[in-house]
Image: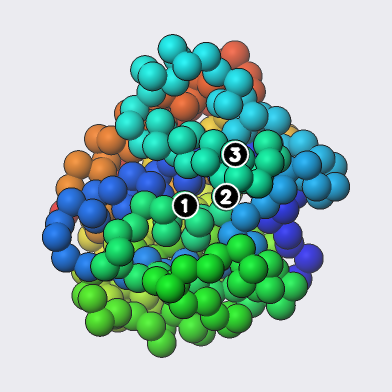
Amino acid sequence: MNYRHHFHAGNFADVMKHVLLLQLLTRLNAKDKAYRYIDTHGGAGQYDLASAAAQKSGEFLNGIHRLVKLDDSVVRQAPESVQTYLKLVEELRSKHGRGAYPGSPWFALKAMREMDTATVFEMQREVFQQLYDNIRDKRAGLHERDAYEGLMGVIPPKEKRGLVMIDPPYELERKDFPQLVQLIQDAHKKWPTGVIAVWYPIKDRAMIDRFEKKLYKSGIRRQLICEVCVWPDDTPVGLNGCGLLVINPPWQFSQQADEALQWLFPHLRMSENGGHAAVRWLVGE
């Protein structure tokens, strides 16, 4: 497996994913009961946008770099989840340099409370060592393990509440993501009340349509789709946009997610014509 998130850290897809992750955890925090955060592909936990990998791709220039350059007066008009996201990015940058950018486990632990716990998987040994070095938190259990088989061993958690964040390296997936669909179905069957969030790339709309049809036919209720496409669907650039599928979204999440994405879209879009940000139900109650 050759995928390394270091090339993509801080791009528009990371911005979208991390803003919505913080919003999901904020909603879970609304109840005074502990929960478990489970990250199936934790990555390095922290990235250096000044590294050769990040500089080679330059993807962060059209992601987090655009937002940190905004005037404070503009940022103050952003939804709370976007403001929180930017404050956390600045917190890491102030400690580790202007090129520092957090990964999902870092953001999650910042949003979680003292009573909550995290389980983070990462199967690539080199990346797991970086994760181990970057995430030192007594609430987090780190596992050098393939989440496609490890996830079933940790759900449902003893807390009975929580969020599973699934963001696999899609070079292993083909066509309409058959392995991922099976993982989603298996996880939901074992933990039907858990919140499951699945990030996915949008490169080919026909493939995404097939992916959605499989999920629709799965029988799983309460499936919410959040999308940002910074390019029109038919633009041959490799990554036109991304989506976050959320099963069992917490109360008020759909409205707040839409507000965040509608604010982010004009700041992240790559084309004056086309592209979109949308939140819609794939399957309702």
State the residue position of label 1. Answer: 107
Three-letter amino acid code of the residue under disc 1: Phe
- Residue under pointer 3: 94
Q: Is residue 139 visible?
A: yes
Spatial CA distance of label 3 from label 2 is: 12 Å
Among numbered discs 3 and 1, the one appearing first in the sequence: 3
Q: What residue is rendered at 54% in x and 80% in y?
A: 143
Q: Which quadrant is the C terminus positioned in?
A: bottom left
Secondary element at tag 3:
helix
Whole-percent x and y of residue 193? Answer: 21, 69
Q: Residues within 10 Å of mark 1 (few under 14, many from 20)?
A: many
Do tag 1 and tag 2 residues touch (Cβ < 8 Å)?
yes
Residue mark closest to the camera, 3 vs 2 = 3
At 59% from the left and 14% from the top, the residue drawn is: 272
Percent across and percent down for residue 93 are 61, 40
Q: Position of residue 213 (x, y in %)?
A: 41, 56
Q: Which residue ends up furthest to the front in the rendered image?
A: 95
- Using the rendered image of the protein, determine whether residue 278 is visible from the camera's viewpoint: no
